[in-house]
Each structure stands twice: as C-alpha cells, then as structure tokens.
Amino acid sequence: MSLIVTYAPRENEAGMGYYRRLSADNALFGWRNLTDTAGVERNRRALLTRTNDVARNLGLEPTWVESAKQKEDVCRSWGRFHRPQFDAVCPACLAESPYLRHHWEHTYVTACPEHHIQLVDQCDACGKHLSPERLYIGLCSCGNDLSSMPCVPASSAQQWLSALIASNGCQSGGMKPILHGVEIDVLVKVIRTLCLYSEPNQSSLPRRAAMPKSIAEAVEFLAPLEALIADWPTGFRAHVEHRIAAGRKDARTLNTLLGDWYISLRKLCQGTTLNPLLQIIIDVAAEKSECVLGLDSAKAMAEDATGYMRAPDAAKAIGVSASRLHDSIQRGECAHRTRRTGTRGQVYEIPCAEVERIKQQRAGWISDIAACELASVPPAVLERMKAAGVIRSDIRWREDLMKGGPVAHQSMLDLLESVNRRVEPAALTDDATLTWAELTSRRMGEKQAIESLMKAIAEGDVKAVAHARRLGEAPFLRSDVSRYFGTPLLEAGMSIQELAKATGWKWESIGKRQLSTVWTT
C-alpha cells in the first residue's frame, strides 16, 4: 500500500531519518510499522537496502530511496564511529527544519557547523537520552520540544572537526588547519591518536575511550584538540616540543624518542592531505633534538627539514656505492657530519647541497656508451680519440668522486664546435669523402696514423668540407686524409680485412706495408 504523504529526502538528510520522518507524517506508529507497509523485514538494514521493494510498495521515486541508501552507506563506512544508540540534534537546525542531518550520526561530530553550537543528545526536561525509536524527530519521547532546548556555544576545535566530517573532508569551515579532500577514515584515526596520547608523561587512554557513546563523552575525549589546533601551527609545535623534552634522553631515533604517538601518526599521515602535520613533527625534531632522522619512511621529509641525507641515500642519489662514498668521506673529499645511533654506532650524513654539487660535477663526465652516442661514432673510434688526446679522458676516473665517467662531456662538444668552425665547403660526391666515424683501424689501418689524422683535424690542419650535427658525421676529403695513410687502401675504398681477402695477404702485413709507405713518402 502506497503512502499518502510522500516527498524527496533533503540533500543532507540521514537515510534512516528520512523514513522516520515519512512514518511520522503518515501517522504510522514508528518506522517499524513502515517496514510492514513496505513489505520488508522489520529491521533497519532491510528498509534501507531493499530499495526496489520499498520504492514500489511505498509509492516512492527510485531516486529517493537510492539517496537514502547512499546516506546509510556513508554512515556504515564509519564503522565503530557510527552513533546508533542515541540521536544527537542541533536545536537551531530543528527549529528551522525538523529533520535529521546524516553527519549528526558520527561519533566525533559534537557541533553544528552552521549555527556554531554543540549538539544535544539528552532532553533537558526528562533527562533521558534521545531515543532513535521516538515517534517525532522534533520532540522527545516525553513531549518536550527539542528546538527549544538551551544552546551551548561550540569551541573552535569542535566546529573544525564537525565541519570536516559534515562536508566529507572537503572543507574545514574556514578554520585552521585548512584541509581539503581529506579522507574521513584517516582523519578520525589521526584525531583518535592525538587524543589517546595527549599526555606524553602518561600512558595512553584505554582504546574504548576513543569510542564515546554520548555527546558529553565525545566532548571530554576530544578536549585535547583545543590546545593542539589553537593558533595553528603554534599550538601543535609547542606540543611536539613538549613531547621531545619529555622523551627518553638516550633516544637516538625519532621512533624511540616519540614512541607509538609518532609511529601511528607517520603511518596515517604520510602520503595524504594530512602530510603537513607530519612535516611539523619532523621540522621540530630537526630543531630540538639530536636524533638521527630519516631512518624510516619519512626520510624524504627529514632531508627537507635538516638539509642532510644519510650516506647510503646520498650514494644512491650520486650514483656510486655506499663503500665508495664512505672512502671519499674518510679522505675528506666531501662535506659531512656524524650522528650517533645505538650505543656505540654512528652514521654519516651528507648535506643535500653537497650531494647536488657532486652530481653536477659528475654530470660533466660521461660513459663511453654515452660519448659514442653523443658523437655518433663506434667504440673503436672513441678509443683512438682518447689516445690522440683530442678529447679529455681519464682511465682512472673511478678513483675520482667528481667524475661520472671516463670522458669529459664538454671536450666532445668543443671538438665538434672546432671542426664546424673550420669547415671549408666543397661540392663533391660521397665517394670523394670520408666521415670521422669511418676513421677505424679496421678500415684505415695503422692506429697511430689515425691518431695523427685526428690531431691534425683538431689543430685545423685538415678541415671538414661540410658542417655536421654530430662529430661522426663530419666529412673530410680523401685527398686530405690520404697524406696520413697508404693510398691503395683509400682509393679502393676497401677495409684491410676486405683487401686481405682479395689479395690473400695477411691483414697485419697489409697494415705494416701501408705504414711503411707513409713513412717512405
């Protein structure tokens, strides 16, 4: 049987509150009678989840019952923070429009973000808590008008937390700390930790205290928030300093110094919109303690706060092994400081600025592979360039912390710039030229002759005939190159191996005859 009076739920109306309001407006004796009319089981879950049956039998729009179900799903997602035992209401809200706001059902909501007064869950006439089974939302079971109950101003902390929960973490009512997009599940766990461990010199409160059943219990449990968020972040910084001063004097790590309080907050806040809270803890610890920071998952934040990073992390950032960096520290090649850890141990920390300086220095030296790619030459040509001294290289580069490879990057660029600057253009066919990348012993013969040619090019005695984007592509006249090699090989355009195969001579003999020809001429 359809209801006589039907309407859509309000935007912020509690799912169960919507059906209670419908039952009252249709003169039904409580919401359980409404379940009989809807043809579902006489329990809250059935009424809110069997949306098709409820909509069809009560004559409601499917979107209306779906909205009520979604509000119920939000409440159920709160888990043990859902307040099912008693109703909590705002007298001012009921005076304006008597319906239950769904965020009133959260255990930690103790204030009305709109009217800035505390919620009430106890009738001032009969003294009883507001039963969720009462017939009319705006009246107590004793008949007292709830909208006329005294209004108690809410504190800033109560308003801040209630506004966040009411908006599903979207906004804090303009009060500091300003938060946006915070997950309610994470938020309430952080609040629970802050209030359970509010006194550093005392053991934490029993965990059941974090699940208050009434508004009065919730106000008492959440009271430490007042000092923590007062004049944000000054109040919280003062609390962290107090905890550090009260911590173990022999503590060498932040986990030991601040204990479960810090460990819980770190796990909850890191990587969330509550990260600034954790950053404050790290910043204060860097200023007020001698602990080794960065030994846990918050090491990136510790590096930002202290300006130092641990030696293994610095070695990884630089691109060397930890033992290699340790040797450099012992030789005084980089700035560092030491910190005690454990009873006799110590750790080395490198300034972040020093790490960046070393990385920049090392970037000026590149690997053989990178050098070959930069110049577009094969490894054999690069080796001849090193031997000829036309580029800067260091075979013992691994012994120098400031070098990231055996080849100086700038020397490669300088050589290319020098070759391009001395270009003498000439219109010739491809077979009349050789490129720098073709100056290999496999093709040209004696290595010393190749090195002599490379030196001549670097000094400007042999000039390229066209500009090149990369060194290996720079072309040179065969006639200029032939002065440094035997002519038959160049004229044939064959490599020594190819010539050896064609003549039957050993390629070593061809190379020697070629060199003797050069010396004779």
Image (spheres, rainbow, N blue to C red):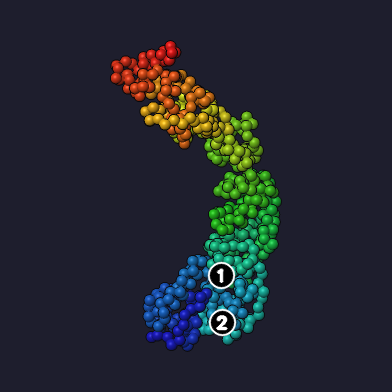
Q: Is residue 213 visible?
A: yes
Question: Which residue, as the protein is rendered here, is positioned at the far top?
Answer: 520
Closest to the observer: 119 or 247?
Answer: 119
Q: Is residue 257 visible?
A: no
Secondary structure found at label 2 = loop
- The amino acid on which the numbered mark 1 sits, given as a three-letter code, is Ala
Q: Give left or right: position of 6 versus 323.
A: left
Secondary structure found at label 1 = helix
Residue at the image position 44 percent from the left and 27 percent from the top: 476
* Marks 2 and 1 in Cβ contact (< 8 Å): no
Closest to the observer: 399 or 484?
Answer: 484
Residue 97, numbered label: 2
Vertical relation: 162 (above or below) 430: below
Vertical relation: 257 (above or below) 395: below
Q: Residue 261, located in which quarter of the rendered image?
A: bottom right
Q: Quadrant of the N terminus?
A: bottom left
Question: Which residue, as the protein is rendered here, is positioned at the far front?
Answer: 427
Whole-percent x, y for residue 57 in the image: 38, 82
Number of marks in picture = 2
Whole-percent x, y for residue 461 in the image: 51, 23
- How much space separates mark 2 and mark 1, taking CA atoms? 17 Å
Whole-percent x, y for residue 153 in the image: 67, 74
